[in-house]
Image: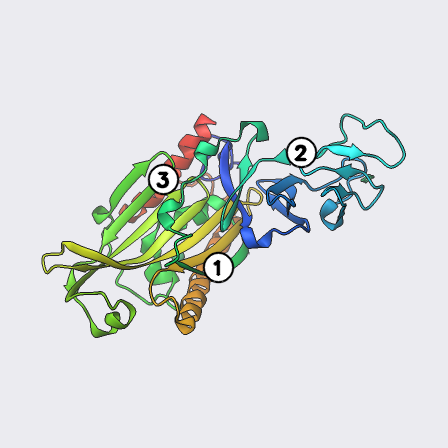
Amino acid sequence: MAHYPFHKTGKPWPRNQWYVAAWSHEIETTPLQRKLLGHTIILRRLRNGHISAVSALCPHRRMPLASACIDENDQIVCPYHGATFSGAGHCTSLPFQKHVPDTMHLTAFATAETAPFIWIWEGNASEADMSLLPDIKPLKLSAESTLIFGFGYRHVRARAQIILENLFDESHISFTHTHSLGTRCASDRNPADLAITDQPDYLAFRHASPCRQTEDGMLSLFPSLGQFMQVEYRSELYGVSLINTVGTETFSCREDGTHVALSGCMNFLHGITPETETTTHYFIAATRDFATDSKEYTDILAERNFLVIDEDIRVLEAIEPHLEEAETQPEPNFTTDAAGIRVRRRIETLLEDA
Ligand code: FES
Ligand SMILES: [Fe+2]
């Protein structure tokens, strides 16, 4: 397989990185089977609260362990012949013999949890590097003022990289999202206006609307707004698997556009993790720190976000089956592809380094 768009490296995704494996609330003491990064894995929460991620099949006769019982010692008991496995994947006992063959163990994967995300390390568990775990503190997810809502999941029949790049491509909005976001003029976002922040585990593209007189309708959402306001938008890549699209950061400002105070922020979180080379897990959520007690607003925003994402998925799933046959055709880039291409180059560099 040619691994579009990474023909040069011949690899589908970067290794030795953290990827979103699940939402925290999905993982309980009962095992959950999920294929992540080409590995079929069972995830479960141990009694000490840690997350265990081990290969999903018993080595003996390949019994899937997702339906296994957990014994009084918090171990998995294979439903076929009763081998027991610890949370780290060690086979601790066999019912009819003392000797445990060397190959009788599950592969363990390193995990980490920064709620609401559970992360998995793509690489040897012993080499898991906590310093590479994306720092999501700027998202203020645990702040009392932050409401996290609209949790969702989609299985996408398209490779992760095109989903990632799509989230940094604003030029498709007017054409792909006509039913959800409307038809904004294709030229109202000039890619040259993007301010870029480029750090080792963080890449962001920011642009701002012009300063304008505050409309009455905005005051019901942001009572602290003054006479003038400005809205900023941002697309952020945390590590390789988490994208935050800052839907709006609304500032109260002076007439000349200088900011006085941040009146409210809304984020859309996208966890993008390869399942296989051509299929992807898409974890969805949103946050906001204004009008947090309006259930109606929550429902409207969440529903619209799902609509937006489903519109993206429709396009990306239409493209995916043709990527191999189109492999030899040159792919022209537009000026509006600048952010997406920068994301592509960043991932490509990680692939070359790995
Ligand atoms: S298949 Fe698990 S012990 Fe035999
Ligand atoms: Fe989109």
Nearer-N-terminus badge (3/1):
3
**What percent of the width, then of the height, locates residue 196?**
27, 42
Ligand 2, by image quadrant, is bottom left
Q: Viewed as shown, does residue 320 lie left or right of 260? A: right
The residue at which mark 3 appears reads as 202
Residue flagged by tag 1: what amino acid is it?
Arg
- In the rendered view, tell whether residue 248 sits above or below residue 222: above
Q: Residue 314: which disc?
A: 1
Answer left or right for 41 relative to 293: right
In this view, the mark in front (3 or 1): 3
The crowd level at tag 3 (other Cα within 10 Å; few <14, some 14-19, many 20+) is some
Q: Earlier in the sequence, mark 2 or mark 3?
A: 2
The N terminus, quarter of image:
top right
- Please state the horizontal and vertical placement of residue 208, each as a whole percent of the image: 22, 54
- The mark lying in front, picked from 1 and 2, is 2
Q: In terms of depth relative to the viewer, which is nearer, 101 or 40?
A: 101
Q: Residues within 10 Å of mark 2 (few under 14, many from 20)?
A: some
Image coordinates for residue 293, horizontal then vertical, percent: 39, 69
Q: Tell me which amino acid carries mark 2.
A: Thr
In terms of secondary structure, where does tag 3 sit?
strand
Residue displayed at 57% across by 27% down: 126
* Residue 148 seen in this snapshot: yes
Can you tell me whether the CB of the residue at mark 1 lies under 8 Å from the nearest atom of ligand 2?
no
Please say whether residue 157 is visible from this viewpoint: no
When asked about the image quadrant of residue 183, the answer is bottom left
In which quadrant of the rendered view does residue 172 lie? Answer: bottom left
